[in-house]
Image: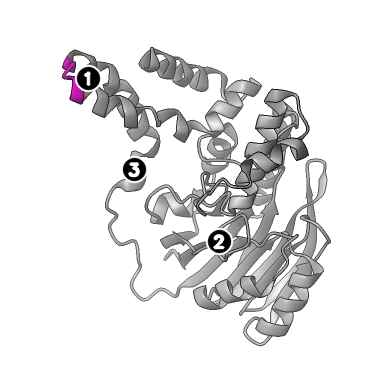
Amino acid sequence: MYAVALCGWFVLRLQRGDTLPWLALANALALYLFLPLLLFIPLVLSTRRLILLPCLLIPLALFFLLFGAQFLPRASRALAGQPILRVMTFNVFGNSDDPELVTTIIESTNPDVLFIQELSPRHSFELTAKLGNRYPFRQFEPLYGRRGIGILSRYPIDSQGWLGLGKDPYAAQRATLEWQGQKINLINVHLESTMPGEDIETSFRERETQLRQLLDLIASDPVPTIVAGDFNMTDTTQGYALFSSELNDAHRDAGWGLGLTFPTNPEFLRTMITFWVARSLGARARMVAPLFRWLYLPPLPLLRIDYVFYTRHLNAINTHVAAWDGQSDHRAVITELQPLTP
């Protein structure tokens, strides 16, 4: 029954994409549809009902089709003699109490260009005070809450301000980087999110609209381009397939493993569990919350929603996820890029 259900989901995914709300959610969480394999495979082997093993071959094949390449050994992609641009994207959690934790992670990873989402005025002040000498070129658009955004760079940038996408005037920002005698377009994004209690279909459609607008913008200016930030989509959604068909995903090209980035902060996950339990019981979240205060949750992210994408003019040679800063609900992604030789 599990194998048949999984095959049915995969066929629907191919035929309908994210056009149905429940299917869109299943696609976004596709990685966790394969968790039963961790139970079924040892169960079949321990009971010696080997006749059932063929039933699990198709789910295994689907898992390796979707995620297997991310666990294969990778040959070096480095180009001899070419300079390296170290890029980092980090959603720093706009409501955080201690922005000093952000500067610690940035100092330890030492990027050349940094894309920040959820940039608050406190973060802006802290980053300028502590890292201003290291990153003399900045484009900050701080806002209270979670809509601020910013770029820091060791190299000169030409600020172009906010970039509205879809219905959100604060979805992105643009700048042009001067690096090694060439211009590189930088686009820092924080796309539409899908939050519990919201209309799933509306959020998915809005995010796909934003992605199409980004692709149109990139196609209109065919120079090297880096698009990085919090995309609020996993790599098994239709939106990801749309965007990665035109741009390269640095993690898929030069990373290893699942590259999970969100939600790292255990408190966020505890809040989500509380919400869903309260909703299923028809109760208020504040009434249910005390039941989960004792629940220990490790700081282990579950989804990959933070990305560095780049155009064919560049080459990713290494990508990894940074350590947790102890506060944000995201982990930063660091990528090393080189220009491709003509």
Amino acid type for the residue under numbered disc 2 = Ala
Q: Is residue 196 visible?
A: yes
- Whichever of labels 2 and 1 marks the residue nearer the N terminus, that label is 1
Task: Estimate how packed mark 2 is, as few (under 14), some (14 to 19) or many (20 or more) residues with alpha carbons within 10 Å.
Answer: many
Q: Are marks 3 and 1 in contact (CB under 8 Å)?
A: no
Location of mark 3 (residue): 69
Give the answer, above or below, for where 220 lies relative to 334.
above
Q: Are marks 2 and 3 in contact (CB under 8 Å)?
A: no
Q: Nearer the viewer, residue 29 or 239?
A: 29
At which x and y percent is residue 70? 36, 46
Closer to the eye: label 3 or 1: 1
At which x and y percent is residue 335? 48, 63
Magenta span of residues: 45-50
Quarter of the image with the N terminus in it: top left
Q: Is residue 160 left or right of residue 298?
A: right
Q: Are marks 2 and 1 in contact (CB under 8 Å)?
A: no
At x 18%, y 13%, the residue is 51
Q: Nearer the viewer, residue 95 or 283?
A: 283
Closer to the eye: label 2 or 3: 2
Q: Secondary structure at mark 1?
A: helix
**Residue 308, disc:** none
Amino acid type for the residue under numbered disc 1 = Leu
Q: Rounded to the nearest whole Å, what is the CA distance between mark 3 and mark 1?
A: 23 Å
Give the colour scheme of this rendering. one colour
Q: Secondary structure at mark 2?
A: loop
Q: Rounded to the nearest whole Å, what is the CA distance between mark 2 and mark 3?
A: 22 Å
Task: Estimate how packed mark 3 is, as few (under 14), some (14 to 19) or many (20 or more) residues with alpha carbons within 10 Å.
Answer: some
Location of mark 1 (residue): 53
